Amino acid sequence: AVDHAAMGHGGMGAAAETMPAAAALGLPAGLALPALPLLRNQSALPGVFQAGLSAGAQALPLLPGKPATVFWSYNGQVPGPTIEVFEGDEVRLHFENRLSQPTTIHWHGLPIPADQDGNPQDPVPAGQSREYRFTLPQGCAGSYWYHPHPHGHTAEQVYMGLAGVFVVKSRSDPLAHLPEQRLVLSDLKLDADGKIAASSEADRMDGREGQFLLVNGAWRPHLTLGAGERQRWRIWNATSARVLKLALPGHELELVGSDGGLLQRPRRIDSLSLPPGARAELVVTGRFAPGHGAGLLALPYRRGKMMSAEQEDTLTLLELRRGAAAKTTAPLPARLREIELLGEPAVRRKVVLSEDMANPAAMFLINGKTFDMERADFLGKVGTVEEWEIVNEADMDHPFHIHGTQFQALARRKDGVWRDEPFLAWRDVANVSAGETLRLRFRQDMPGLRMFHCHILEHEDAGMMGMLKVEA
Ligand code: C2O
Ligand code: CU
Ligand code: CU
């Protein structure tokens, strides 16, 4: 049972809340994994991707025998349409806001100009439209996503259904020969009437989790894999708050990519920890060894010491069915690409994450402050390597995210001991668990205001966000 009688983080006075159990709602499970439809390119010009996106309410049939559930969606789809482009492409998106509140579209992880990145300073008012326009640099192939970023309403707009994936492809992709699956993981929390539930006070403190952990909008769908078959899986953690520890018992898993594209070489793994907002690319080989019937699992994970909404049970996200054995197993290159370690930093900063549960107006803090749109917290320079230490003084995990660039996580300190990160990767989200310090480096290549924040969307909305002002 997934019934939680919420106590609230740290025993604060949250109203008791009962979520109807998953079984009581009758959401169908076990359907085929839905494909993610592509957003059609309306431009005939080479190297230009042009399309329209509109955000609005959309009723979608979800529970048999119940009225359709109202989502907020991009182009009527949940998840939103998939944008697929190539490195070097110019992207022009005409956006219409048909919601009853302001919104923006943030292009999570992409190296694009700050004034096109859907910052909370650039809202699109209800009923209005704007054009987002940017050119993707070479070398940025990877798995990104887009979602709203309006001041104070990001969590609500995302859990109502506004999010879609954005894949940048390379013309020289060493894994292009593999069949590809795209898996968007999201939480759905319904009330007893089958409507999307409002967030409780506990959700706003701990981060919202639902009764249903969906894959491409479906509950426990199935996917077919052959013995010896190799598939490339891109996975998005589009949940508001879950740190997902993923496993696929009985099969071979190789991690080949992170948020910002391929690693240097494949790495054999048993499980993968994916914080909210983060992405990974895996190569899965069908082995059907003992345990293979379990499917793609989310293992139990505790994000905090005193939290109500903890994932205590192993959840099945996806069933794997056995298909015809592969005649040949496509080889995996030993080398995927080069990643160079960023050089010595010109600037070092400390970013302290903390909580003040006694202060409802400013509960989630960065360097003792709550977000202020008028305040740049740090002044940086284009092209300069910065080294940041993200110090989590709170008693729960806070996944750190920065806009406009990818960083390299170098080392972590836990219980007084520094440990180097096991490999180099380009990321834009990294979990920082309670009491931990994460050291990372990045460079911003474009001027403008760049947000950095906790990617538990409720914490971002509550002010666990700051701004880096990058000057030319
Ligand atoms: Cu995905 Cu500033 O966020
Ligand atoms: Cu972002
Ligand atoms: Cu947080």
Image (cartoon, rainbow, N blue to C red):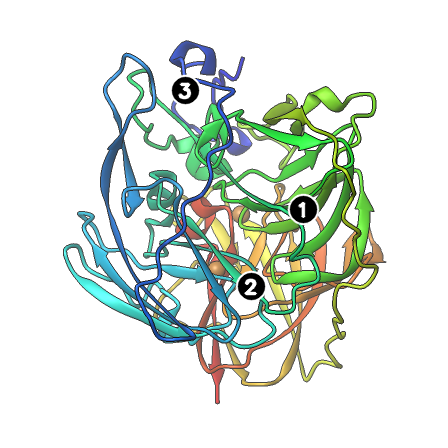
The residue that disc 3 covers is: 16
Q: Is residue 241 left or right of residue 74?
A: right
Q: Quadrant of the N terminus?
A: top right
* C-alpha distance separating marks 1 and 3: 27 Å
Whether residue 10 can be seen here: yes
Point out residue 243 in the picture as x, y percentages from the top left corner.
61, 40
Q: Are marks 2 and 1 in contact (CB under 8 Å)?
A: no
Q: Nearer the viewer, mark 2 or mark 3?
A: 2
* C-alpha distance separating marks 2 and 1: 32 Å
Point out residue 72 in the picture as x, y percentages from the top left corner.
28, 41
Residue ranking furthest to the left: 127
Point out residue 200 in the picture as x, y percentages from the top left corner.
38, 30
Few, some or many C-alpha atoms within 10 Å of disc 2 (few <14, some 14-19, many ≥20)? some
Residue name at image x 63 percent, y 41 percent: 395
Dividing the picture into quarters, in which one does residue 271 lie? top right
Disc 2 marks a residue whose amino acid type is Lys
The residue that disc 2 covers is: 169
| Residue 433, numbered label | 1
Callout 1 secondary element: loop
Callout 3 secondary element: loop
- Sequence-wise, the earlier of marks 2 and 1 is 2
Disc 3 marks a residue whose amino acid type is Ala
Residue name at image x 41 percent, y 18 percent: 27
Callout 2 secondary element: strand
